[in-house]
Image (cartoon, rainbow, N blue to C red):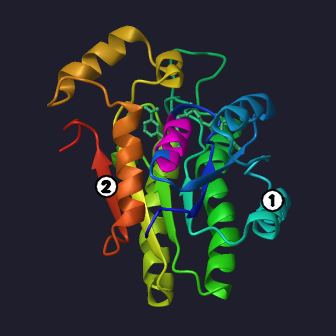
Amino acid sequence: MNLAGALVLVTGGASGLGLAMAESLQQAEAIPIILDRDREMLDTVTTRLGCPGFAVDLTDSVAVDAVVAAVCEKHGTPLGLVNNAGILRSAPLLSLGNAENPRHSLELWNEVLAANLTSVFLVTRAVADRMARRRVRGVIVSMSSVSAKGNAGQTAYSAAKAGVEAMTRVWAKELGPLGLRFVAVAPGYVDTPSTRAAVPEDILENLRRETALRRLCKPESIAATVIFALQNDMITGTTLSVDGGLVM
Ligand SMILES: NC(=O)c1ccc[n+]([C@@H]2O[C@H](COP(=O)([O-])OP(=O)(O)OC[C@H]3O[C@@H](n4cnc5c(N)ncnc54)[C@H](O)[C@@H]3O)[C@@H](O)[C@H]2O)c1
């Protein structure tokens, strides 16, 4: 894909990795359009970047169809989509010493699956439909994680990210003949405020030690991989790991 002038939807682009992606897309002369449920952060970021933004909860199927219709009506069919929005929540399957919560709750499972897996299904369904009908040879990049390989303490998150990688392969097979491409990107631990809020410093230090390059990923490295996936016309149905050698 030639990024100059290309419309690229970035979900969860109001903060963290999605914001770094929106900035990199602008540097590559593409036009990012941000979808995020946090209206305040969205307003701040879209004003600063001077790009379009839409406030929406991406786990709501009716709202997703409506926002994709509104984007297409106002700006045209996007050439790219980055499914980046997600949440990180951790819990073990069993906490036998915890009398109050001895088992992973169904509520947490449903919340994590909705935010990290169902949202990707809903947004991709809506956007790929538009691309296919308009004969747009679009590209859809979805954020996975090293957790897709199975991180202890992350039943729901790991299941969701493994699901994202599987859907990427399914859609590449189904829609490749129409020229659509699908790529997953699996970061290791990225040095962002949300990572620091979710993971205690001593655990981050251990992760640094377990990483071949002995450092956390930078948001720019993930954004550069997303740009590469959008641009390279022969990559589809695969997951690009960007983890400094944490999982080999
Ligand atoms: N940060 C990391 O270390 C890391 C590592 C591996 C994978 N990832 C993945 O990268 C993506 C971005 O992570 P991040 O660290 O930048 O997260 P973040 O929390 O900083 O940003 C996520 C953004 O998504 C938005 N969002 C969440 N749920 C939403 C919903 N239902 N509807 C609309 N918007 C929603 C939030 O408002 C937020 O702006 C996620 O998919 C995450 O799983 C992150």
Residue 87: give x, y in percent of width and height.
59, 36
Amino acid bearing label 1: Val
The residue that disc 2 covers is 240
Q: Residue furthest left?
A: 212
Number of numbered discs overlaid on the protein picture: 2
- Compared to 61, does 25 lie above or below? above
Inspect the magenta stretch and tell me whether residue 243 lies in it: no
Quarter of the image that includes the N terminus: bottom left
State the image coordinates of residue 135 (x, y, percent, origin top left).
60, 87
Residue drawn where x is 85% and y is 63% of the image:
66
Q: Residue 85 carries which label?
A: none
Amino acid type, mark 2: Leu
Q: Does the magenta stretch include residue 21?
A: yes
Q: Which residue is drawn at 60% across and 55% down?
A: 31
Residue 151 seen anywhere in this rendered image of the structure: no
Residue 18 lies, with reference to residue 117, above or below; the image says above
Looking at the picture, how far across and down is residue 212, in whole percent? 14, 31
> Residue lying farthest bottom?
177
Residue for point 62% across, 84% down: 132
Front one among 104 and 136: 136
Q: Label 1 belongs to which residue?
A: 67
- Whether the residue under disc 2 has CB within 8 Å of ligand 1: no
In the depicted view, which residue is nearer to us: 244 or 15? 15
Circle 2 sits in a helix, a strand or a loop, which is it? strand
Who is closer to the viewer here, 158 or 76?
Answer: 76
Is the CB of the residue bearing disc 1 within 8 angstroms of ligand 1? no
* Foreground tag (2 vs 1): 1
Q: Residues within 10 Å of mark 2 (few under 14, many from 20)?
A: some
